[in-house]
Image (cartoon, grey):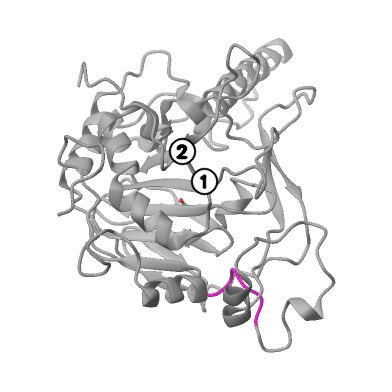
Amino acid sequence: MTPTATTSHSTSASASASSSSSGALTPAQLAQFHREGYLVLPRFFDPTALLARAKDLVQSFSLEGHPLTTFSTGRGDEEDADLTVADKEEQQRQKEKKKHVGDRYFLESGDKVRFFLEEEAVGADGKLNRDKSRAVNKVGHALHLHDPYFHDFSFSSSLQNLARSLNVHADPRVLQSMIICKQSSIGGAVPHHNDSTFLYTDPPSAVGFWFALEDCTRTNGCLSFLKGSHRWPKDGTGADSVPKPSAPRPVEDEEITAEYGTPRGINARFVRREAAEEEGGTTFVTLEQNEEADWDEEGATLEECEAGSLVLINGSVLHQSKKNLSEKSRYIYTFHMIEGDPTRAHFDERNWLQMPRGADGKREPFSQLYHPPAPPARSGL
Ligand SMILES: O=C(O)CCC(=O)C(=O)O
């Protein structure tokens, strides 16, 4: 095991049989990543301590003041014929208030550690219908800032070396770190998407780092990918045959494009609604109609993997995970990197995830992978 640059815990991201001893990718692995849009690296790290930590967090978070109803679905919306008009108006006011609280809980989570619940874990009465440790959908979105285990792991020397060898970002910034629990029986599906839709930069630059803390199988909701969907085909039906998009496409070395094809941009981005809009919350805005490939369920590749695997995900490649119908949970840890060099890409105010403003009114920067923030205190662990 290669120890991390910063850790004193046993949470090292280590190189393995699948990569060189420093964590750097081999030429063959790089080629596969560029060709297929993702790369599975089995036995990349030891998941034991991180899994235990993730389970501790989910077991011990406080429900006090938590906006439990925020992530419920349409259940509980049924009309009650016995209610008076005044009762219904009051019910509507309460619902909007809860939605507002829920929106804030989500939108202010970019620099916090917050707990989001499974829709099926909240009953129509607005209460949890199971133990909280089995109700959490995900924990995010700044474990890399606030949790010593996830901080040390995320900024480890192996991951720094890997990012250098990937060579996508000049100044990689770490953001949107999450534990995704995929609880047994109820763990929700993640519909097909690409990550640059949710972490938009101009031009797109997101790369996902996804770490299996438990075995991920077809029955507990492993990832599946539409291989190569991050590029236009090179068979004459590709980017050259459609008008140039008004939305930017990812930029990369000309040699890579020449070898594998033109990178695809994205059709839409996920943004905060303007403060003036009554509904608040988030929405999608269209950038292009036909820049992305169409999802093809039959053509998708299921990627089962063992605990300890790292999956690298290009920001334009389409992927999804299905509902966990099994008796086993599927804990993973993930974070993303975007380009932080302002001459190469720009992250703007419309993105859903934002850092808070400092005393000078400016947004605090996202963490630099190569110059990590100070580790959080370990008191109270
Ligand atoms: O873990 C999952 O099920 C989905 C995660 C994912 O799609 C992502 O992080 O982009």
Q: Which residue is mark 1?
A: 171
- Quarter of the rendering containing residue 103: top right
Give the percent coordinates (x, y) of residue 17.
Answer: 20, 69
- Quarter of the rendering containing residue 235: bottom right
Residue depicted at x 68% and y 39%: 271
> Which residue is outermost to the bottom?
235
Location of residue 250 with respect to 124 vertically, above or below: below
Going by the image, does 307 lie left or right of 208? left
Residue type marked 2:
Gln
Callout 1 crowding tier (Cα within 10 Å): few <14, some 14–19, many ≥20: many
Residue type marked 1:
Asp
Residue extent of the magenta highlight: 227-233
Give the percent coordinates (x, y) of residue 178.
Answer: 40, 40
Q: Is residue 184 visible?
A: no
The reply to whether callout 2 and callout 1 are in contact (CB within 8 Å) is yes
Q: Which residue is mark 2?
A: 368
Q: Nearer the viewer, residue 131 or 271?
A: 271
Total numbered labels: 2
Quadrant assignment for the C terminus = top left
State the separation of the CA atoms marked 2 and 1. 7 Å
Q: What is the number of the mark on residue 160?
A: none
Q: Is residue 378 visible?
A: yes
